[in-house]
Structures are given as structure tokens and as C-alpha cells.
Amino acid sequence: MPKSPSSLPIEIKISTVVAISTILHSADPIAIDAALKQMTGGVSDFFEDEFAVIDVAGIAEEAGRIDWEALVALLKKYRLNAVAVRGAPAALHHVIRAHDLFLDDGTSGLQTNGGREREVPAPAPVEAAEPAPAPVPAAAPAAPTLAMIVDTPVRAGQRIYARGTDLIVTAVVNNGAELIADGSIHVYAPLHGRALAGASGNADARIFALQLQPELVSIAGVYRTFDDGFPADVARQPAQIRLVGDRIDISSLGSAIRS
């Protein structure tokens, strides 16, 4: 008779892990440290020990100068736990693995094809004398992705992630709670915790709430904290948060009030 999972010494389940994409534009640790200090504004729990994927695609030519041990320690200083590297040249793969970092291909979180891209050959030219090809039937439209709906209060320490869709919450989001969605976030109640919309890079995502008093908001990786308090002209009333250029914009749903 097989044992129940609870009677085994270990149990394996599929789990969703959310990681912050840390995109490097320089290999200089001093410049990176200064940028992180400015970004976090000295807030010690800005990132709260979150996982980080180091993206070096933009500096591939100088990635060989990266001191990986120092970089991992620097991110740890700001409570970012580096777990993987994306966009690294093949020549650096053994060095990266030697520092216990995975190679990420941007999709599954693990390197599966050696980092190489396939080249698609151009189609052969068609002679004028050949008959036109038969029309290809239009593909059936993809089924819409339904939003994730949460009807219960989101308590401190809870993290909810709506992968590939919007997140709708109909109850209060307490301080210390975290909402994450690849799409937009809609809270039909007070929002007091952290809300991160467009987590996969969708800059058009927005955050809506009946009462806004959040600890932190983010759209497509652009963060804003409220250590000095939430703007009084939009606090505790229906409002939206969106990304305008490279800054967070907060406005009342009844009027366009810039933060």
C-alpha cells in the first residue's frame, strides 16, 4: 500500500517563484552600488529578500569583467538574492555556474538550449508562372485568459501572483501583504500593502483601488515607496496608478491629478 505524502520525509510540488529582473547597464560595482542606493532611497527593506535574475544582455561585451562574487554580495547588501543570470555569453557560463547561479533563458528560468538562437532561413522565391498558393484558413482566436479573483482579505505576509493575467481583489489588502500581476491590479477595497503590476514587463498595466494607502507600488519594474506618506489629494479615494515615461503617475478616478 503506497504511503500518503504526509508520511514521507520529503514532498515535491510545483511552485511559482517570482524574481526581480536586475538589468545591468554597467559592470562597475561602484556605479551599481550608487544606483541601488539612489533607487532604494536608503529604505532597508525596499526589496525584502526577493529573488533576482541578473540580466547582462545589454553589457555582453564587458560581462567578462564582472566580479560575480562581489556582485552577488552587493545585491545581497540590498536584500536581493541573486539566483540566475540571463543574456550571458557562452564563454562565461562555466564561471557563472561556479558561483552557484543558474543560467536563465527568459522563459522557464533554466538554461535549456545553451543560449543559442536558431536562424530561420528565408523562404525560396516563387516564380511568377506558379499558381498562387491556396489561402490558409484563419486560426481560431485564442481563448481569453480569465483574471484571477480573490474574495478574501489578503493578510500581512501573504503574496498573491496572477501569472499572465489581471488580478482582482474584492477585500482589504493589509499592510505587509503583496499583490503581483503580469497584467493590471484591481482592488475593490482599501489597498494598504504592496502592489506590483506589469510584473513581466507590461508598461501599460495599471493599479486601481477604491482606497489607496499603499506601502509600495510598481509598474513594469518601476518602483515608488511612500515613506513620507501617500499624496493627500488622492489618499483614501478611488484612484489609479500608471506608468508615464519612466515615472509613476497617480491620479484620482474623478480627475487627472499628477503625483
Image (cartoon, rainbow, N blue to C red):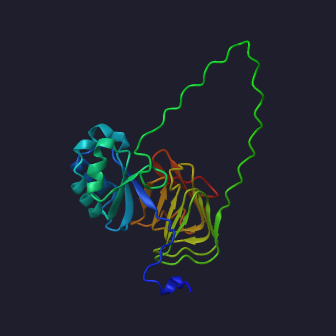
| Residue 152 screen position, x and y as percent | 61, 78
Quadrant of the drawing holding the N terminus: bottom right
Residue 47 seen in this snapshot: no
Residue 250 seen in this snapshot: yes
Q: Is residue 92 above or below residue 210?
A: above
Q: Is residue 87 left or right of residue 186?
A: left
Relative depth, front residue between 95 and 27: 95
Q: Is residue 114 above or below residue 173?
A: above
Relative depth, front residue between 104 and 214: 104
In the picture as drawn, the residue positioned furthest to the top comes out as: 129
Q: Is residue 189 left or right of residue 113?
A: right
Q: Residue at x 49, y 51 (%)?
A: 107
Q: Residue at x 39, y 66 (%)?
A: 227
Q: Residue at x 29, y 45 (%)?
A: 92
Q: Is residue 240 left or right of residue 41?
A: right
| Residue 167 screen position, x and y as percent | 60, 63
In the picture as drawn, the residue positioned furthest to the front comes out as: 1
Relative depth, front residue between 10 and 60: 10
Q: Is residue 184 above or below residue 237?
A: above
| Residue 93 screen position, x and y as percent | 31, 48
| Residue 124 screen position, x and y as percent | 60, 21
* Number of dots carrying numbers: 0
Relative depth, front residue between 71 and 213: 71
